[in-house]
Image (tube, coloured by chain):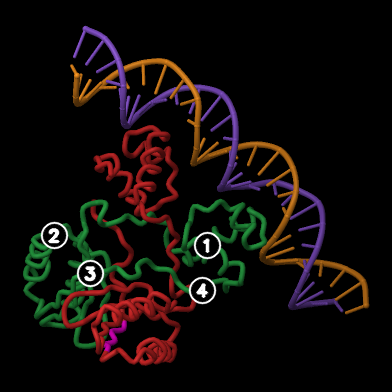
Chain colours: A red, B green, C purple, D orange
Amino acid sequence: MTPLDDYDRAILRLLQENNQMPQREIGAAVNLSAPSVQRRIRRMEAEGVIAANVAQVSGEAVGLPLTIIVTVELVSETPDAIDAAKRSFREAPEVQQCHYVTGETDFVLVVCVASMPAYEEFTRRVFFGSGNVKKFRTMVSMDRVKTGLRLDI
Amino acid sequence: MTPLDDYDRAILRLLQENNQMPQREIGAAVNLSAPSVQRRIRRMEAEGVIAANVAQVSGEAVGLPLTIIVTVELVSETPDAIDAAKRSFREAPEVQQCHYVTGETDFVLVVCVASMPAYEEFTRRVFFGSGNVKKFRTMVSMDRVKTGLRLDI
DNA sequence: GGGATCGTGCAAGTTTCTTGCATCCCGATG
DNA sequence: CATCGGGATGCAAGAAACTTGCACGATCCC
């Protein structure tokens, strides 16, 4: 993979904020021509530096106002059990993010739901359904202080 | 705010995956003309349903391969102390996400760093620097099972 | 010094976005 | 029951942005 230079990093900083900025403007901001900007963006997309170009949708606006962070501890930590858990979390549409982590806790989930009853239904289906969840801790987000994935590069 | 109809939701589902799909293709997928698609996107952007259009950058690709989830407990939970903590977390470039949550834990952070020494430096600067962090629990992500913010709408 | 490689800017060609306009649908009103 | 008005739609033309071929310049390695 081609290492990133200062131009690449400057372009990424802009695209992380707004990936619809015209190449012409990006070029003006970083002192490159529009075609050069485009070729760099293309290259970074091909190399996976830019993983995706997406619209961020407001959970409140689409009827999912609750963000809940859950730490999950499993009964069995065999590779098969871990894989089964990963699969069930990946498939659950409520789960926005899922990390398999070190320490006593096995998983940390970020869940978006419409209401607490919807959350309870989720826990019944996903946690109690498997029979392999020893315990989980629910932390309701009162304030999304910072969100998104703006890497400092 | 105008309630979302099925067209809006279909458009959002596509834009959450790829916000660079041509309006013509979106229109073909949802049975609308390109101008109609555009007007709906514009409206949803203006109303905040679409919060942002961003490029997702791979942490590995830019030299930040470690994702760490941290739960933080404060000594003092007065409004002023909470606000000060929020500010310091918001300002720290390593912090990708920060939630102020209910329960014994006060904050949950998602942090991206280059290495464990860089993480230790971060904890010294941000946690011990304030003098108001009672304790924190470090969970290193071994597998980003699921990431991003794809809402099921 | 010579030559290959890579990135750049320019400019033309192509695609996409944008907008004015006429039409249609649907609910409210007389 | 007919009519009116608001809002959304599709079409088409114009504007903007993206894409690509080409020549030039820098750099590195003989």
* Picture residue at 67% right of the left edge, 61% below the top: B31
Tell me the chief SS of the magenta region.
strand
Q: Secondary structure at mark 4?
A: loop
Mark nearer the viewer, 1 or 3: 3
Say which amino acid is labelled 2: Ser
Q: Residues within 10 Å of mark 3 (few under 14, many from 20)?
A: some
SS under mark 3: strand
Q: In the image, residue A134 lies at what x, y percent?
A: 26, 91
Residue A146 position (above or below residue A63): above
Q: Does the magenta-highlighted stretch encompass residue A145?
A: no
Determine the chain carrying the residue at label 4.
B
Chain where mark 3 sits: B
Give the percent coordinates (x, y) of residue A72: 27, 84
Q: Are marks 3 and 4 on the same chain?
A: yes
Circles 2 and 1 on the same chain: yes
* Residue behind mark 4: B153
**Magenta region:** A136-140
Between disc 2 and disc 3, whose residue precedes?
2
Quadrant of the image for the N terminus of chain A?
A: top left
Mark positioned earlier in the residue sequence (1 or 3)? 1
**Of the pair D16 and A8, the residue shown nearer to us:** A8
If you read the primary sequence from the N terminus, does the residue marked by circle 4 or circle 1 appear first? 1
Q: Which residue is mark 3?
A: B142
Q: Which chain does the numbered disc 1 sit on?
A: B
Mark 2 and mark 4 in contact? Answer it, CB < 8 Å: no
Disc 2 is placed on an element classified as: loop
Alpha-carbon distance for marks 4 and 1? 11 Å
Task: Please name the residue that numbered disc 2 is placed on.
Answer: B115
Q: Which mark is residue B14?
A: 1
